[in-house]
Image (spheres, rainbow, N blue to C red):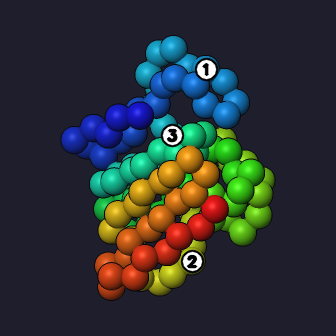
Amino acid sequence: MALTNEGFLWSWGRTCARTVDIPQRVTGISNVVAFSCGCFHTVAVCKDGELFAWGENRDGQLGTGNTSSCSLPTIISFSSVPVVNVCCGGNHSMALLRNGSLYCWG
């Protein structure tokens, strides 16, 4: 995974669904300022503080409220406070909010 200066994410390698040999731009998300990858999931923050997640969700690591995997970036709504940074482990995710609150799930 790579983030360009323009705020676009590019992805390649092994995902939960397939292997991608040539870098491909991640669609459905732009103005990315931070991202983190777990074993088979990714979480990203956009300039406006919105949080997106996609990939494997067996342990609830996407934060969607269920365990269904998502192949495309899906907006995650859990707080009205903007997200400023994210971090992922193997099967969990964390988000730091502008007010200093830290949320963890998965």
Q: Residue furthest top?
A: 21
Assign a secondary structure to mark 2.
Answer: loop
State which tag comes first along the sequence, 3 or 2.
3
- 9 relative to 13, above or below: below
- 37 relative to 16, above or below: below
State left or right for residue 32 relative to residue 73.
left
Q: Residue at x 34, y 54 (%)?
A: 34
Residue to which mark 2 is pinned: 78
Assign a secondary structure to mark 1.
Answer: strand
Q: Residue at x 38, y 71 (%)?
A: 96
CB atoms at circles 3 and 2 under 8 Å apart? no
Q: Residue at x 44, y 22 (%)?
A: 23
CB atoms at circles 3 and 1 under 8 Å apart? no
State left or right for residue 15 relative to residue 98.
right
Residue to which mark 1 is pinned: 19
Label 3 sits on what residue type?
Answer: Thr
Label 1 sits on what residue type?
Answer: Thr
Quadrant where the C terminus lies?
A: bottom right
What label sits on residue 27 in the rendered view? Answer: 3
Quadrant where the N terminus lies?
A: top left
